[in-house]
């Protein structure tokens, strides 16, 4: 199984499948798509209007990974369910935190 993120020079790119208008903000599990790529399934309460769901996702990721909200941004998929988030920070530490969040979500 491939990781739901890609290491970059000054951070990571996290691949997420977002479900807006949920009853709770949370991560669920890692899912493999038909093309073999993996992504983290996430749910947020916000509606997908005026970027509200994307902002809620950025806050959820920042809180879960222990980074400032300003370190997280949606860089691809702004209007689709499959998104790529850029997280600025020390890549190895961020990768470990993502793995820990994914492990907790799967349990």
Image: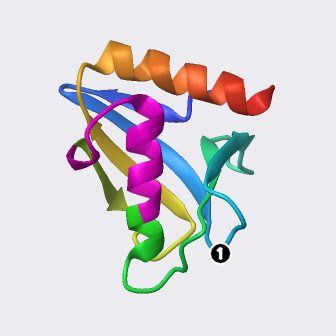
Residue 79 x/y as whole percent = 45, 77
Q: Is residue 107 or residue 10 the one in the foreground?
A: 107
Figure colour scheme: rainbow
Q: Is residue 63 or residue 27 the one in the foreground?
A: 63
Residue 45 x/y as whole percent = 60, 68
| In magenta segment, residue 55 | no
Q: Which quarter of the figure has residue 88?
A: top left
What secondary structure is the magenta-colored segment mainly? helix
Residue labelled with disc 1:
21
Residue 101 x/y as whole percent = 59, 28
Look at the picture and state if 37 lies above or below 84. Answer: above
Residue 62 x/y as whole percent = 38, 41
| In magenta segment, residue 60 | yes
Residue in the picture at 37% in, 85% down: 50
Q: Is residue 10 or residue 62 the one in the foreground?
A: 62
User: Magenta stretch?
Assistant: 56-70
Question: Looking at the image, can residue 98 be seen?
Answer: yes
Number of marks in the rendered image? 1
Residue in the picture at 81% in, 25% down: 107
Q: Is residue 60 left or right of residue 27?
A: left
Look at the picture and state if 7 lies above or below 64. Answer: above
Q: Dot 1: what SS?
A: loop
Q: Residues within 10 Å of mark 1 (few under 14, many from 20)?
A: some
Look at the picture and state if 18 lies above or below 78. Answer: above
Question: Looking at the image, can residue 77 be seen?
Answer: no
Q: Quadrant of the N terminus?
A: top right
């Amino acid at each position: 199984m491939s990781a739901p993120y890609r290491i970059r020079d000054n951070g990571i790119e996290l691949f997420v499948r977002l479900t807006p208008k949920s009853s709770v903000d949370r991560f669920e599990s890692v899912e493999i798509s038909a093309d073999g790529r993996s992504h983290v399934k996430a749910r947020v309460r916000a509606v997908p209007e005026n970027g509200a769901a994307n902002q809620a996702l950025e806050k959820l990721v920042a809180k879960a990974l222990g980074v400032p909200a300003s370190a997280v941004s949606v860089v691809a998929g702004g209007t689709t369910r499959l998104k790529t988030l850029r997280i600025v920070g020390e890549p190895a530490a961020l990768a470990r935190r993502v793995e820990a969040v994914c492990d907790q979500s799967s349990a």
